Image (cartoon, rainbow, N blue to C red):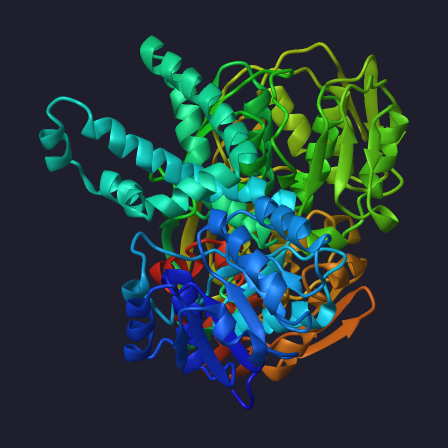
Amino acid sequence: MSSPVINKLVVIGLGLIGGSLAKAARERQLCTEVIGVSRSQQVCDRALETAVADRAVTSLADIAGELAAGDVLVIAVPTLAVAKVMAEVSQIVSDQVTITDVASVKGSVVADATRIYGQLPSQFVPGHPIAGGENSGIEAVNSQLFENHKVILTPSDSTGEQHLQRIVQLWQGAGATTEQMSVAEHDEVLAATSHLPHMLAFLLVDTLAGMRDNREIFRYAAGGFRDFTRIAGSDPVMWHDIAQANRGALVSTIDHLMGNLAEMRQAIDAGDSEYLLGVFTRAREARNHFTKMLEMKAYMEPESDNNVIFTVQPGGAVNGTVRVPGDKSISHRSIMLGSLAEGVTEVTGFLEGEDSLATLQAFRDMGVVIEGPTNQGGGDGQGNGRVTIHGVGLHGLKQPAGPLYLGNSGTSMRLLSGLLAGQAFDTELTGDHSLSGRPMNRVAEPLRTMGARIETAENGRPPLRIKGGSHLKAIDYKLPMASAQVKSCVLLAGLYAQGETRTTEPAPTRDHTERMLSGFGYPVERDGASATVRSGGKISATTIDVPADISSATFFMVAAAIAPGSDITLQHVGINPTRIGVINILRLMGANIDLHNEREIGGEPVADIRVRYAPLKGIAIPEDQVPLAIDEFPALFVAAACAEGQTVLTGAEELRVKESDRIQAMADGLQILGVDAQPTADGMIINGGDSGCGKIGSGEVESCDDHRIAMAFAVAGLRATGPVRINNCNNVATSFPGFVELAQKTGIQVTEDRTR
């Protein structure tokens, strides 16, 4: 460091924590001098021998007169010994010296400090490093102990800012990160996450040691037992003190656990497999889920430190029979309606992507037992994407223990708000930083009209707080704008509303909710632009094979349409009439597309789509097809670049407010590759090759962190004259798992590189 963050550092207690902090400060030059204090001369001598301290004394009184402003004193003794040390400190240490501690319990320490000083002194910054090990004493000292660990500080209103900042700098200099919380919250959290596990480990080992044949029990104990009971080797005195000092929070946590343990015992004795499966699946998923929620991260967050680059070699054709990942919209709804069904719903082809995983976790948090997903290839028809949902019925959801964290999924939040408006319990819906900035009044307002009590943050942003116990009434809602999410939200709330709920939309939108409700046996009346549901029905479990996503299939459809020699069949693709604009547009351009094996699965029409190469021609894209293909235009722009003549798109201004400005992003990239592409306010004009051979050259383009832009330019490489390099393709993996591997399998010469 350029200069020490503090002057003298005095550490009272040279065990694992105190000694490790002293040594870290000395090695990293965080202070001008490190002075250790221990009642044992032997420990003092060892501290000097092992370079833990510059000086070591057996009495604080020996050095107290030296201490002044800019110095820090750390009390690193067992919890119940803190009061005695602090009483001595209060008598002989200047009120200009910054004081902190490392005790695992903060309530008792703060109470002692207040009693000793008459009030909580401004120089005192209570602290607790979340680090340690089963070994103790000066021989266990490790100067790297705090690297990438958290230190919780619990300052009060009376804590001096300069003292607080000094302690923050000390711990950060030792490699830790600091967080602040209240004393009460700290003790409750630590009782559950640290103190209780130690109590259980001590008790388990003590119990087994007292059983007959204990030698055989320990002889054959496997790795899980050793890992869990490792902490039973910790310092008994320290944990005795912690149990005494934090008895209130610890007893409350133990009582809660004992209730659940009694339920588990009963379930094991009764052979209640559903209860056991629920506990085990929820617990397994919770470990990852809570980490993401607390850090407000996406469920499948891309590797932000890496720039994923696609490089496509020119030429080639696509051939074969493949299945692309499952449809995200239908994956969402399969979890929602399967959870509210009576019976067990089997789902295959589920898309294990960012948004649909958010929906799945939300229903787990509301007590639904969900097995899976078992997905090793994005749901490719080989047994992947399998989810088993043990439905609880329309009124069987339970109040979640905390907010439902939905990552980056606006669909999850908007559709869930409709379902939750009719529940008997309160809920709060939160998301990551991106979702927290999106407007939710478009669903909150019609739900309030139905009688729901919903609070939002400023300007209608998340979090959404939904009060339970509302008696919803049916409405006849005319949507002010075309939105499948708003329509679905109102219809799902209608399942709980008294009377007949009707929605009427100004233009056609996706009708997956209406179709899937019917597939689950719930009556839905449809009349042109209107859809109607009544409460009082029943959702019955079914089997769903989620159709392959037509948006994902589009990239391979366009690839076959532009590359001579191509012949590809895409299996089990959803061909919902509200989604088939891409098929209609490509056919108008002259593409050779056939639909085979047309059928209906869970209310959704599906088919196998065969595409063979045929020369394309430019067209004026009919505006009535635009909303039916809004997500597919990045790939369609590539088809237009390879078509003979001019292609004109109008009426697609929505493309400018997707994950990127897709009109500008595609125009910029196509121009870099030598294509005559002119963006307009609501579309694009593309002049393709004079003879249908295209004019795509070589170059480096930007995806603008948009997965559809990245995949569209990967397809363009089939007709390029040289390599095409595509930057920032990180997000492709979260929306189309296995894209690169599947593209390579069909004949696209794309590779993936990661650079920092």
Between residue 515 and residue 421, name the one nearer to us: 421
Q: Is residue 401 above or below residue 177?
A: above
- Left or right: residue 469 compared with residue 25: right
Residue 594 pos. (x, y %): 50, 45
Count of numbered labels shown in the rendering: 0
Q: Residue furthest bottom?
A: 2
Residue 336: quadrant of the picture: top right
Q: Residue drawn at (53%, 45%), measured in percent from left and top? A: 290
Q: Residue drawn at (70%, 73%), measured in percent from left and top? A: 162
- Left or right: residue 683 compared with residue 556: right
Between residue 169 and residue 313, name the one nearer to us: 169
Q: Is residue 756 visible?
A: no
Residue 743 pos. (x, y %): 41, 61
Residue 326 pos. (x, y %): 49, 42
Residue 169: quadrant of the picture: bottom right
Q: Residue drawn at (43%, 77%), measured in percent from left and top? A: 314
Q: Is residue 203 visible?
A: yes
Q: Is residue 446 above or below residue 185?
A: above
Residue 693 pos. (x, y %): 53, 75
Q: Residue drawn at (37%, 45%), measured in percent from left and top? A: 237
